[in-house]
Every structure is written in structure tokens, then in C-alpha cells.
Image (tube, coloured by chain):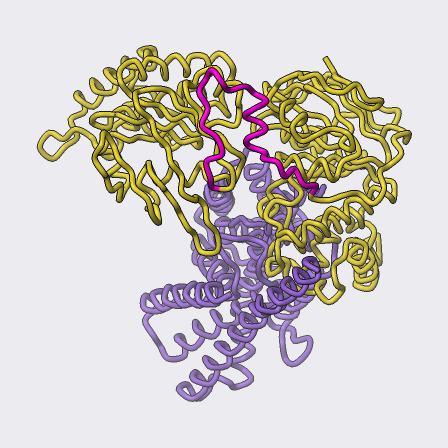
């Protein structure tokens, strides 16, 4: 009798809890709504905003940050944070450009550069897992190391790689009038979402970020999973660096200087939490990236002072965090 | 204290409690968890207000409206959980909140002098006031804790709430000397402990609480371990759960441990668990039973001795390795160490068996279909409705959450399941279900170790029961013939004469 009552009560409690996915839905819906609202406002106030050419521009401008943000998302899902996004991407950009210009094949240059970036990611993972340094400090140190290595190789030069493939990244259209680099970004999001939702690795990342102690007691190799996440992230930053060469055509000292903030803001706008892992979706990061890209693009069309643009980006970050609080507080 | 009652919504924590202490003495207060000790102490310390009743100190009715007021009245409390700030110095901790002021600044010189003086009063001159608390061993931190309480202007009543649970034996002795010397200086000590032998050693008078009522006031001369145990348990000793069928204890040993040690908490334990049996391990808080369980499950450091699984000696130095040998662990801390709150129930169940639900092993891709089928099987096996599987585990009740954890290990199929406090935070109805699920696991051939401070629970559930005291096994019982009194006495460290039944033997 009492056990039957308890069962009924359990059921009632579970229903009151809102069933599953209420928050997931609120978050996905919320961010898409914000994106569409911005789209409408921007289109009404800047006539050329939704022109095909400008849409192409927005995607092109966001593809580097977009790819890097996949890596940042994976790291943040484990409950960490990676401040070395921009610096590792910059290092990769310099390495790949420099190696092709000193006579190596593109294949070799790209492989070496991606390996170096993955290596920096591996270093992050080892510092966090083995040496047990807080992620924010460990990746701050690698930020300096990676940026320093990049600048060392660049040595105050400007590099203008001559290999035609770089140019084609931005100019050769594949489908819907979108160039290779955009297709690469979207493709990586598709793969990323698949990996995170449908594979053992992805599930393990969510588990480690959701509850590290429980993951350990469930027999998951927590250390290996975390290190793999940072390493994979480093690799993706390297891909971002490679795309940067195509996007800019020129490699210089200050490339990707604001990439850190843009990537982290995009991830946060996409609904990930700095304080808690295991929550969030790769797909939503893409929407976050596009929102950040749209804002930047709109401000450029409107000729808004870059300094002011930066302030607005900060405002967007505030807004993202507040919305996150609201949704979280309600559940 | 006269006629003290305290009502919380839905329960009466204290009913008409009288407590009279006529002269400075060491006064014992005992009772099981939930008997009302903590509530009584918190009323004295000004953290709760009594619902009715009166407190008089030296004849005057007083109103202890806040901890500050309690301090003014000379009432201090030494808590069982340490309240020190590890990064501050000893002296700063001692005077925290009442630092001597010189103008606008803290008078550092007086601060350290005061600390030295008060440490001297309890014979702890050896602790330098400049040292950081984090650098002190546990026993010295306890002394600092006492010194901190002594800074209240005129201590008249000091409450020690389970002060010995974390201390090694030598330090316990020293603590008692300090308590005695405080008493000689006119301070009344109220000593709260689950360790009745200590209470009997040091207290001049003892009050026993049960279900919020005073059930006994004993003088030292009339108190014995047996009487205390009987009084705290009461007559009821009702069985919480009774097994449908006890296991036949002739299965092969799944696991054997010889001379197992964990730091200083477990000091040489031999045990064996057979296929298809539930082994209960009982001990008072801090007797080493949780550490023992974690050592088996690969979640303990400084483990010594030998563990044998089947025919092989194994090292369970990580949960991953323990699981490889078929040993799973469910800890007492479900939220922090068991569940993934933001994942669905199904994912919570399958997380330890992802290798079984792969569609394409080469890319380690999960198969939704396999996962759904196997998690449904596991859920059905532990009594979770399949509709619940798609909910987030955080919205489930404690009972269903615990069932989800059982389901996790049912899906993985382990040989030995170690559970610490299996029904903590689970309401009564769901408890019976959990017991039933554990029993079913055992019928399917799994061995289960249940560790609990709740004696009736273990007695109802186990095929065999051992008690731990100070990290050693004190007795082994057959719960069908043993009484709760006998088990409780063994948990208190008494090697009482236990009826020499066939399956019952006293170890060392």
C-alpha cells in the first residue's frame, strides 16, 4: 500500500519537474528567436543586409571563429575553458603560411601546422589533467606560448602565401554560392554534432562535464577523455588558422587578436555555461557564431566605430549570461 | 531546561524535554540519529528557538535568541564539522569576528597574545598562533576549535558535538583531559557522542534521547553499555524488511580480502563475500566501514593488504580497474558521485556499459536502438517505468534515482555490488522497493555488500553481518538469530558474549 502510494507520488513529482528537455527546448527556441529577431531588425534598418552577397559575407567572416568555437565548445562541455583559442589558431596560421613559402608542399605544411596546434591542445590537456592546473590558468599560459611561437616564426614580417589553394578557400564556390571555407565550417559542425550526440566519445564528454566523480565511478577514463577534448580542440583551432590565411590572404602580427573573445562569446551566446560542463549543444554554438557574425557585419555596414563595436560585443555577452541565468533559474 | 519542545512543520523534534545540570560536570547526551540531540544543542546555542518550554541558567530564565546571545550567556559549542578557515593563522581563527581593535586597525600584537593565552589554558602551548591552520594536523585543529570557543567572555557551558569522530585514540585521551580541567575550572561540559564507551568513561551523568523524548537519566554508577544501548534502541526493534528467502551460504567466494588497510581508518580487515549473498557491514560513523567499501570499489587511497577476486590477486586502485574485475560501487553521496543530473535516465543507466550499445565499433558510434532495448531491460529489472527513461534524472525522486543507479550496474552485470547507505534520502515506501531490488540482484547471482549505520536496515537485508569498530572487525552475526542489541554492542566495540550459533563466530 505505502509503496503504491510512493510510486504515485514519485510519478507526480516527475511530472511536476516538467518532464525532460523543457530547458533544452527553451534554450534552443530562445536563441533561434533572438537570431531571427536580430535578422529582421538588421534587414529593416540596413537595406542590403539580407542581400545574397552579404549573407555570403557573413558566413565567410564567421567561418574561422565558427571552426574554432567547435573546439571551445568541446572543452567547455568537459567543464573547462580554453583561453588559448586565438593564439593557437594564430600559431597555426603562421606555421602553415611560413612552411608553404619556404618550399614545402601544402599537404606537408598543413599537416605539420595542425599537428603543432593539436600538440598545444595536448599540452593544455596534460596541464589540466596531470599537473592539475586550473583550466583558465593552464590555457592562459599556453596562450602566451602559442602566440609567442607564432610571432617568433613571423618575426615582424608580413607573409603573403603564393599557393593558390589559399585563395580558393575563399573564392571557389561549392554550393549555394558559398565558398570552400564556409562548407568546411558547416561540414565540421555536422561532424561535430554527430560525434557529440551519437558516439561513445561524445557521450563520455557530456558525462565528464556533467559530473566528474560520477564519471570516474562509472568506470570512464576521465583523464584520457579530458586530454582528448583539449587535443581535439587544438586541432580545430589549427583548422581555423588555416582558413584565416584564405580569408585574409596575408598573415600579420595582429591576426586573430580578438578571436578568443569572439569564440568564447559565441559559445556563451549559444548557451553553454562557464561554471558547469555537460550542458549545451554544438549546433547551438553555430547559431551563437552566426549571431556574433551578424552583429559585426551589421555594424560594419552601418559604419559604426570599431571601438563601439567592441563595447556592443561586451553588451551581447552580458545579455547571453543574463538569459542563461533566467532559463536556469526557472528550471 | 524545562519542558522544551520543538516542532518543525510535520514533525515534533523534541517533546517536553527536561534537562537539569546542578553543578559543573561532564554531562553525556546520547541517542540515535534523529533522536533530537542536534535540535536540543542548536536551541542551546541560539540557532533555533524552542517552540515551548523554558531555559534557566543559575535560576534565571533566559531567552537564547541568537548565537551571539548564547555567547553572552557563556554558552559555546564545538562543532563536529570543523569551522576553521584554513588559510588564516591560528590566532586569526581564534579571534574571528571579535578581533581586538586598536583605533581602526586590528591590534595584531594583542591578537597573538590573546591566542597564546587561550591556547595555554587548554595546555596547547605547542601550537604557535602564527601558524596557518591548513598546516596543522587534525588533532591540533580540534584544539584550536576549542580555544576559539573559550574566547567567549565567561564560558559556563561548553557543548562538544561528536568531537571524537575524527580523532585518533591518543588525541581523544588528551581531549578528555582538557574537558576535565575545564570542568575543574567551573565549566559544564555537554558531551555528545555515538561512542558510548567514551561517554561512560568521562561523563558523570547521562541523558538518553529517543524520538525527541528523554527516555533515561542515568548516573555514572548505574550506567552500563548494555543499558545505554537498550535505552537508545527502545523496545521496538521492528524489522524494516524481511527477506523472502535467505541465500544458501555455500557459493564460491566472489571476493576475499586479507589484512586490508586504508590509511589509519581500516586496520587489518579479513573478509570474504560469496556469490549470491548480501554481506552487511555495520559501524558507527567513522569506524572505517565507508573507507573499507570504497577500497573494494577502487575509490580509496593508501590501501594495503590483499584483495582476491576469483583465483587472482588484484589491485583495485581505480574504479575503472575494480569494474574490470566486476566490482561496482554506489556511494552514500548519490548526487555528487552517482548521477549525471542533466542527462536522461536512460543515459544515466547506459553510461557504464557504452561498449555494449555500439552500432559501429570502429567509430564507436552508439546505437539508439540497442541503447533503448538494453536500458529498458535494466529499468524493468529494477522497477523503473519505461516512460521515465527519457526524463532528466534530476527531476526524479530519491528512490527512483537510486533505482537508476542500480539499473546502471544491472545493465553492466557486475559480480559484486558495494553499496554505502543504500537508502539515504529515500522515503519509506521506496526503501522497501530498493531492498527488494537488491534481493533480486542477489538471486541472479550477484554478491552485494551493504554498508550502513542503520542497524535494522542491515539486519533485515543481510545474509551475514559484520561489525567494525575503530577499523577492525569486532564480530560476525547471522542476522536471523542476532538481536539489534547484540549488533549495537559490537558496534560500540564490546565483544559481548554472543550466542555461539552455527554461522556466528567472533573474530579476533
Q: Residue at 81% of width from left, 41% of height from top?
A: B414
Residue B215: in magenta span: yes
Q: Residue at 55% of width from left, 32% of height from top?
A: B232
Relative depth, front residue between A33 and B305: B305
Q: Report if residue B307 is visible in the image.
A: no
The x and y percentages for residue B407 are 75, 51
Q: Residue at 49% of width from left, 18% of height from top?
A: B222
* Above or below, B450 relative to A65: above
Q: Quadrant of residue B454?
A: top right
**Magenta span of residues:** B212-239
Q: Is residue A301 left or right of residue A214?
A: left
Name the residue furthest left: B103
Q: Quadrant of residue B415?
A: top right
Q: Quadrant of residue B386?
A: bottom right
Residue B77: in magenta span: no
The x and y percentages for residue A1 are 71, 60
Chain letter, purple in picture = A
Relative depth, front residue between A105 and B290: B290
* Above or below, B151 relative to B183: below
Q: Is residue B437 left or right of residue A147?
A: right
* Above or below, B97 relative to B260: below
The x and y percentages for residue B199 are 48, 21
Q: Residue at 64% of width from left, 58% of height from top?
A: B393
Q: Report if residue B217 is visible in the image.
A: yes
Relative depth, front residue between A215 and A105: A215
Q: Colour of chain B?
A: yellow
The x and y percentages for residue A89 are 54, 53
Q: Is residue B434 left or right of residue A63?
A: right
Q: Looking at the image, how many numbered discs can be counted on the residues?
A: 0
* Above or below, A321 relative to A212: below
Amino acid at each position: 500500500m505505502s509503496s503504491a502510494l510512493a510510486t504515485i507520488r514519485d510519478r507526480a513529482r516527475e511530472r511536476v519537474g516538467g518532464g525532460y528537455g523543457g530547458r533544452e527546448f527553451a534554450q534552443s527556441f530562445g536563441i533561434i528567436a533572438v537570431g531571427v529577431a536580430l535578422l529582421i531588425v538588421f534587414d529593416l534598418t540596413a537595406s542590403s543586409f539580407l542581400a545574397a552577397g552579404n549573407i555570403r559575407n557573413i558566413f565567410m567572416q564567421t567561418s574561422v571563429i565558427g571552426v574554432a568555437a567547435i573546439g571551445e565548445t568541446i572543452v567547455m562541455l568537459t567543464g573547462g575553458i580554453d583561453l588559448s583559442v586565438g593564439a593557437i589558431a594564430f600559431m597555426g596560421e603562421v606555421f602553415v603560411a611560413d612552411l608553404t613559402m619556404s618550399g614545402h608542399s601544402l599537404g606537408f605544411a598543413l599537416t605539420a601546422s595542425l599537428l603543432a596546434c593539436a600538440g598545444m591542445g595536448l599540452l593544455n590537456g596534460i596541464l589540466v589533467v596531470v599537473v592539475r592546473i586550473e583550466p583558465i590558468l593552464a590555457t592562459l599560459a599556453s596562450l602566451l606560448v602559442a602566440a609567442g611561437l607564432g610571432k617568433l616564426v613571423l618575426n615582424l614580417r608580413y607573409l603573403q602565401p603564393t599557393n593558390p589553394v589559399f585563395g580558393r578557400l575563399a573564392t571557389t564556390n561549392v554550393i549555394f554560392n558559398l565558398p570552400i571555407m564556409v562548407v568546411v565550417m558547416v561540414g565540421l559542425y555536422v561532424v561535430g554534432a554527430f560525434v557529440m550526440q551519437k558516439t561513445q566519445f561524445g557521450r563520455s564528454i557530456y558525462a565528464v562535464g556533467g559530473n566528474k566523480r560520477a564519471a570516474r565511478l562509472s568506470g570512464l577514463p576521465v583523464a584520457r577523455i579530458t586530454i582528448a577534448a583539449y587535443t581535439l580542440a587544438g586541432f580545430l583551432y589549427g583548422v581555423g588558422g588555416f582558413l584565416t590565411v584564405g580569408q585574409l590572404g596575408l598573415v600579420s602580427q595582429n591576426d586573430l587578436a580578438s578571436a578568443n573573445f569572439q569564440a568564447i562569446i559565441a559559445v556563451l551566446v549559444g548557451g553553454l555555461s562557464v561554471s558547469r560542463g555537460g550542458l549545451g549543444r554544438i549546433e547551438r554554438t553555430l547559431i551563437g557564431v552566426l549571431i556574433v557574425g551578424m552583429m559585426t557585419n551589421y555594424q560594419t555596414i552601418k559604419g559604426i566605430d570599431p571601438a563601439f563595436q567592441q563595447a556592443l560585443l561586451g553588451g551581447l555577452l552580458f545579455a547571453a549570461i543574463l538569459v542563461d541565468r533566467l532559463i536556469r533559474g526557472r528550471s | 531546561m524545562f519542558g522544551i519542545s520543538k516542532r518543525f512543520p510535520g514533525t515534533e523534534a523534541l517533546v517536553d524535554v527536561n534537562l537539569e545540570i546542578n553543578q559543573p560536570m561532564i554531562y553525556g547526551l546520547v541517542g540515535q540519529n534523529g533522536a533530537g540531540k542536534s535540535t536540543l544543542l542548536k536551541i542551546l546555542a541560539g540557532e533555533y528557538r524552542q517552540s515551548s518550554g523554558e531555559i534557566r541558567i543559575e535560576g534565571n530564565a533566559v531567552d537564547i535568541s541568537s548565537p551571539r546571545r548564547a555567547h553572552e550567556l557563556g554558552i559555546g559549542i564545538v562543532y563536529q564539522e570543523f569551522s576553521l578557515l584554513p588559510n588564516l593563522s591560528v590566532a586569526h581563527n581564534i579571534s574571528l569576528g571579535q578581533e581586538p581593535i586598536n583605533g581602526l586597525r586590528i591590534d595584531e600584537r594583542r591578537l597573538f597574545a590573546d591566542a597564546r593565552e587561550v591556547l595555554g589554558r587548554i595546555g596547547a602551548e605547542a601550537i604557535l598562533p602564527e601558524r596557518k591552520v591548513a598546516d596543522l594536523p587534525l588533532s591540533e585543529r580540534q584544539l584550536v576549535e576549542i580555544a576559539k570557543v573559550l574566547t567567549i567572555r565567561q564560558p559556563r557551558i561548553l557543548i562538544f558535538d561528536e568531537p571524537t569522530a575524527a580523532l585518533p585514540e591518543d588525541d581523544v585521551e588528551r581531549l578528555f583531559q582538557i574537558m576535565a580541567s575545564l570542568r575543574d575550572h567551573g565549566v559544564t561540559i555537554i558531551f555528545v557522542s555515538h561512542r558510548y564507551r567514551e561517554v561512560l568513561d568521562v561523563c558523570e551523568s547521562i541523558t538518553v534521547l529517543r524520538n525527541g523524548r528523554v527516555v533515561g537519566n542515568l548516573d555514572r554508577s548505574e550506567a552500563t553499555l548494555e543499558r545505554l544501548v537498550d535505552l537508545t534502541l527502545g523496545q521496538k526493534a521492528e524489522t524494516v524488511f524481511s527477506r523472502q528467502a535467505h541465500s544458501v551460504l555455500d557459493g564460491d567466494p566472489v571476493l576475499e580480502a586479507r589484512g586490508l588497510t586504508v590509511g589509519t581508518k581500516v586496520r587489518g580487515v579479513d573478509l570474504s563475500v560469496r556469490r549470491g549473498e548480501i554481506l552487511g557491514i555495520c559501524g558507527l560513523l567513522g569506524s572505517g566501514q565507508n573507507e573499507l567499501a570504497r577500497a573494494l570499489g577502487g575509490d580509496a587511497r593508501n590501501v594495503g593488504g590483499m584483495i582476491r577476486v576469483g583465483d587472482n590477486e588484484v589491485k583495485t586502485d581505480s574504479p575503472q580497474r575494480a569494474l574490470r574485475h566486476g566490482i561496482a560501487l554506489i556511494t552514500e553521496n548519490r548526487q555528487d558521485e552517482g548521477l549525471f543530473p542533466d542527462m536522461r535516465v536512460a543515459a544515466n543507466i547506459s553510461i557504464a556499459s557504452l561498449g555494449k550499445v555500439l552500432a559501429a565499433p570502429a567509430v564507436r558510434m552508439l546505437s539508439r536502438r540497442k541503447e533503448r532495448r538494453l536500458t529498458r531491460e535494466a529499468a524493468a529489472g529494477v522497477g523503473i517505468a519505461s516512460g521515465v527513461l527519457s526524463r532528466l534524472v534530476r527531476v526524479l525522486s530519491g528512490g527512483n534515482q537510486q533505482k537508476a543507479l542500480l539499473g546502471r550496474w544491472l545493465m553492466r552485470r557486475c559480480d559484486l555490488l558495494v553499496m554505502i547507505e543504500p537508502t539515504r534520502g529515500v522515503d519509506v515506501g521506496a526503501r522497501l522497493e530498493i531492498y527488494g531490488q537488491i534481493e533480486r540482484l542477489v538471486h541472479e547471482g550477484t554478491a552485494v555488500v551493504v554498508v550502513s549505520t542503520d542497524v535494522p536496515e542491515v539486519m533485515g537485508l543481510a545474509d551475514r553481518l559484520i561489525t567494525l569498530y575503530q577499523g577492525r572487525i569486532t564480530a560476525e552475526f547471522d542476522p536471523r538469530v542476532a538481536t539489534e542489541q547484540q549488533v549495537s554492542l559490537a558496534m560500540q566495540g564490546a565483544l559481548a558474549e554472543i550466542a555461539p550459533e552455527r554461522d556466528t563466530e567472533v573474530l579476533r
